Image (cartoon, helix red, strand yellow):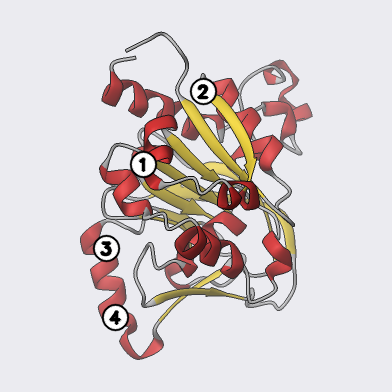
Amino acid sequence: MSDSKPRVLVLAGDGINCESETAHAFSLAGFMPQIRHINDLVSERVSLDQLSGTFSVLALPGGFSFADHLTSGKVLALKIQHQLGWNLGLFADRGGLVLGVCNGFQALIRMGTFGKEISITQNASGRFINAWTKVSPSGTRCVWLKGVGSMDLPIRHGEGRIVFDQTRKTEVWGKMVRLGRNCLTYEDNPNGSDESLAGLCDSSGRIFGLMPHPEAFVRWSSHPEWTLQAGRASAPGQGAQLFENAFQEVRRGSNI
């Protein structure tokens, strides 16, 4: 393959507000990100074949896409599924990677990426949360989390509580564990998610969604307590490893 950097498509749209941070995090890891408004992609009728042929990664950033007008992430999910007609599972089968952060994760859930028995709703507190929290990976399925330990990451959401079909909760949880989708959990469960879930992956491990923001901690100086270890000011933040893992996964698959 050529020496060109692998490309990342970072979605932008009305209300999405983390596209620049997300693109920067991918750039630091060695990717060439391209930010595109989803309405432009729709008007250009960009097909799944074009997506797969041009981009190694699709990123759905955080924010409040289309003002969460029909519940969080719903309009974005509908645009991806029905106006673009993209099957993200097929994109992953072709070697693509998908990352959905916060609102992007909500959109992945609305698309049924992690199962129809899973949804996302308002935080148990009923309040918007803007804080730092500790999360821990679980299992080995998710390629984004290879070799990652516990991390401090910021959360910024009002609807981040992952919930199961309450009539089949035990069954749903058992299936999730069996398929390795329960890949990231909170240590303090700030929003009341079932089983303290902070993130999920699909059965391939290539589509990953999480409520915390790894793109907001790619430099140690972003951490609120960074001055306690001032010697580490120029060190990478803990979120950076997720993007580096994605780069290494693309390299393994394409012999870059």
Image quarter hosting the C terminus: top left
Label 1: state its secondary structure: helix
| Mark earlier in primary sequence (2, 1) | 2
Direction from residue 216 to residue 81 in the image, left or right = left
Observer-side mark, 2 or 1, equals: 1
What is the C-alpha distance between the residues marked 4 and 3?
11 Å
Where does residue 196 sit, x and y in percent of width and height? 47, 65
Determine the residue positioned at 42% across, 49% down.
Answer: 208
| Mark earlier in primary sequence (2, 4) | 2
Observer-side mark, 3 or 2, equals: 2
Q: Which mark is residue 65?
A: none
Q: Are marks 2 and 4 in contact (CB under 8 Å)?
A: no
Residue linked to disc 4: 170
Image quarter hosting the N terminus: top left
Observer-side mark, 2 or 4, equals: 2
Residue linked to disc 1: 49
In this rendering, is residue 26 above or below 72? above
Amino acid type at circle 3 is: Val
Please rate how many residues cluster around mark 1, counting C-alpha atoms within 10 Å: few if below 14, some from 14 to 19, many from 20: few
Judging depth in this view, the residue of 227 and 17 nearest the camera is: 17
In this rendering, is residue 212 above or below 225? below
Direction from residue 105 to residue 53 in the image, left or right = left
Label 3: state its secondary structure: helix
What is the C-alpha distance between the residues marked 2 and 1?
20 Å
